[in-house]
Amino acid sequence: MALAGESRHGMWSNKWLFVLAAAGSAVGLGNIWKFPYIAGENGGGAFVLVYLACVFLIGIPIMMSEVLIGRHGRQSPINAVRSLVAKSKASSFWVLIGWMGVLAGFLILSFYAVIAGWALHYGWLMGVGTFQNADGAMAGATFDAFLANPWMLLGYQTLFMVVTVWIVSRGVIKGLETAIRWFMPLLFVLLLVLLGYGITSGGFPEAVDFMFAFNWDALSWDGVLVAMGQAFFTLSLGMGAIMAYGAYLPDDASIPGTVTTIALLDTFVAVAAGLVVFSIVFANDLDPSSGPGLMFVTIPLALGSLPAGEIFGVVFFVLVTFAAITSAISLTEPALAYLVEEYNAKRGRVAISLGVICWILGIGSVLSFNVWADVYVVGSLTIFDFFDYVSQNIMLPLGGLLIVLFAAFVLPRELVRRQIGFDGGVAEILWLLLARVVAPLGVLAVFVYTLYQSFA
Ligand code: PHE
C-alpha cells in the first residue's frame, strides 16, 4: 500500500527528475522533426511568433494546471480528475478530460511510432555512409524511396513500439530515470554542435530571417491553429501526459519553477532545431516548405559533408530516437496508470495490450505514405494527416481548454493556492489573469475564428 501523499506507481526521487522526465516528454519529434517543417510550410516568421506566444501565454498556465491536478490526485489523470470532481462537487462532465486524453494518446502514439521508425532507419543509413558527399537531390530521392516501401516502414515502426512497450512495462520511474539522465544532456550537446555547423554553413542569416522576420501575409488562419496546436503538441499538453507525471512529483517542488524550466528547455530545442534545419535548407537551395521529409533530407546532407559525419549521424539519429521514446512513454502513461488502478492489472500486460492497439492503428499511417497515399479520410487528408491534424489541432487544445477551466474555475481556490504555493502576491494575480482569461480565451478565439474562416 502506498503511503498517504505518494503515488502507488512510484515517485520521482527529486524535482529535477520530474523536470527531466517532463522535458523528456516534451522534447521529441515535435521539436526536431515537426516544428521546422510546419514552420516552413506556414511561411516562418509570423508562425514562429504565434507559436512562441502560445507556448508562454497559453502553454504555461495549462501545464501548471496539469501538474497541480496530477500532484493533488496522485493517480492517473482519469482518477485524479474524478477525485477532484467529488471534492469540488462538480459535474462528472469534467472526467471527459481524462478519457479524451487517453484517446488522443493512442492516436498520437500510432503515427509517432512510424516517424520515430524513420529516425531509426536514418541512424542506420548514416552509419553505413549512404550520405557521404550527397547532394540535395540524392537525399530527397533516398527519402522518397524509403517511404515507398511499406514493409520497411512497418518493420521500424514495430521495432520502435517493441522497445517502448518494454521500457514502459518496467515502470516509468525505473525505465525513465536512467535513460533521461544521460540522453537529454547528450542531445543538447549534439544540437549545439549542429548549430555550430548551421552557423558556418552560409545559410544561417537567411535562416534567422526566415524564422524571425514577421511576415504576416504568409500566415493563414489555419496556420494560426497549427501554431497553437504545435504549442500543445510540443509541450505534451492537453492529454494528461504531464498530469500523469505530476502525480509522481514530490510535494515540496515548486510548480511555477519546474513548469517554466520545462517550457524553456523545450523551446530552446525547437528553435535550435529550426535554425539548424533552415540554415541547411538555405545553404543548399532546398525548399523550406517541403513537408515531413525536411529533417530527413537536411540533416543527412549536412552531416554527410562533415568529417566523421557518419559517427555524428548515427549519434544524432539515435538521440532523436531516444527523445522520441521518452515522449512515447509519456503518451502511454495516462491510459496505463488508469488500467493498473482500475483493474489491478500487471503493468507489463497492460503495456503490451496498449502497444498492440497503437501498432495496429499505426499501420494506417504507414500505408498513407505509399499504398494508401491516395486514400483520404476527409478533404485531402490521408490517414496520417488526419490523425495528426485531429489530435494536434483539435483534441489537445480542447483538452487543454477544459483542463485550465477546471483548474481555474472549478477547483477550490484554496487547493490551487496551496498546490502552486501562492500567498496573494503578483504571481497569483498573473496566474489568475493567464489561467482565467488569456489561456481560455486564446484557445477559444483561435477555434472560433478558424471554424468561421473554413465555413465563410
Ligand atoms: N511533446 C512530444 C514531442 O514534441 C509529443 C507528445 C505530445 C508527447 C503529447 C506527449 C503528449 O515530440
Image: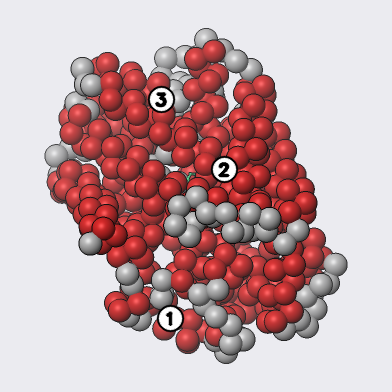
Residue 124 visible (yes or no): yes
Q: Residues within 10 Å of mark 2 (few under 14, many from 20)?
A: many
Q: Nearer the viewer, residue 341 or 15?
A: 341
Q: Among all residues in the image, which is located at the extreme bottom? A: 202
Question: Which color scheme did the rendering employ for the protein?
Answer: secondary structure
**Sooner in the amino-acid sequence: mark 2 or mark 1:** 2
Residue 449, x across and y down, in percent: 23, 58
Q: Is residue 315 visible?
A: no
Q: Is mark 3 within 8 Å of ligand 1?
A: no
Sequence order check, earlier mark of 2 and 3: 3
Q: Residue furthest top?
A: 1
Q: Which residue is mark 1?
A: 210
Task: Name the residue located 41 percent from the left edge and 76 percent from the top edge.
Answer: 43
Q: Secondary structure at mark 3?
A: helix
Between tags 2 and 3, which lies in front?
Answer: 2
Measure the C-alpha gap from mark 3 to mark 1: 42 Å
Element under label 1? helix
Q: Residue tagged by mark 2?
A: 109
Between 411 and 40, which is closer to the camera in this rendering?
40
Front residue (pair 327, 152): 152
Q: Is residue 275 left or right of residue 315?
A: left
* Residue 180 percent coordinates (x, y): 61, 46
Residue at 26%, 58% in the rendered image: 455
| Mark found first going from the N terminus, 3 or 1 | 3
* 3D distance between C-alphas at marks 2 and 3: 19 Å
Q: Residue at x 74, y 67 (%)?
A: 145
**Closest to the observer, 184 or 236:** 236
Q: Quadrant of residue 165?
A: top right
Circle on res. 78: 3
| Dot 2 amino acid type | Leu
